[in-house]
Image: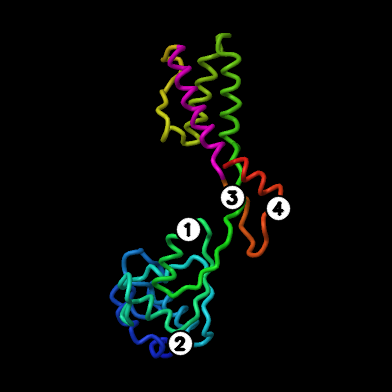
Amino acid sequence: MGVREYQSLTPYATALEENWGKPPGNLNSDGENLLPTSWLCSISLLEKIFTLFFMALMSLEFMPGKQVGMSDVCYPDSLIGNIPNIYYYAANNPSEATIAKRRSYANTISYLTPPAENAGLYKGLKQLGELISSYQSLKDTGRGPQIVSSIISTAKQCNLDKDVKLPDEAEAISANERDLVVGKVYSKIMEIESRLLPCGLHVIGEPPSAMEAVATLEEI
């Protein structure tokens, strides 16, 4: 779209220039100022040329303007114009779907969230779990301080020291204090391992398999 066509389709675009410069302007958004020129250009093209808007998790409904009873000076109203707004919204986010209906006249179609599974442990975290198992079986053999030193070093490499207070050296603390350190690290990696992660993306119109559904139910 050329600048002249853009200006003819969006007569209110001059309000954007204070934050983003003249077209094409800057492309980023900071979440506080008005939408950038590129965003306005794309949605205006949809309204004037294609006459249909199919959305999935955009930001039209959060643009500046009144919350209810909007007028043509409110950006959601100005941008959506007369476009039918068919909007896929996740079934676990009804509050924002309501905003989309109220502020962008959306006809929402709910879709399922992807099936979930445990995050598990990998790389350094998996190695950390193995070191903790070694400590539990060998701590009374004289190798306790050495293993805890490895646990502390590996935990720091995994950035767990941001969540767990770790000593500099295992040799400088007592056996009880070593147990406490190992216990705290163990609790943290168990927390990480048990977190739920989505198994890929949900495909519209395709239900989860029986195995995926059972796995999700087991983790709830």
Q: Amino acid at mark 3?
A: Pro
Q: Quadrant of the C terminus?
A: top right
The disc labelled 1 sits on which kind of residue? Answer: Asn
Marker disc for residue 2:
2
Give x and y (percent) for residue 187: 50, 28
- Secondary structure at badge 3 equals strand
Query: Quadrant of the rendered structure where residue 166 is?
Result: top left
* Residue at 38% across, 79% down: 77
Residue farthest toward the left in the current orientation of the protein: 18
Alpha carbon separation for disc pair 4 and 3: 14 Å
Q: Which image quadrant for residue 6?
A: bottom left
Q: Secondary structure at mark 2?
A: loop
For marks 4 and 3, give the one nearer the viewer.
4
Residue located 36% across and 70% down the image: 63
N-terminal-most mark, 2 or 3: 2
In the rendered structure, are the residues bearing label 1 and label 3 in contact, judged by CB atoms less than 8 Å apart? no
Q: Which mark is residue 93?
A: 1
Of callouts 4 and 3, which one flags the residue occurring earlier in the amino acid sequence?
Answer: 3
Which of labels 2 and 3 is toward the front?
3
Q: Which residues are magenta?
A: 175-196
First in sequence: mark 1 or mark 3?
A: 1
The residue at which mark 3 appears reads as: 198
Circle 4 residue:
209
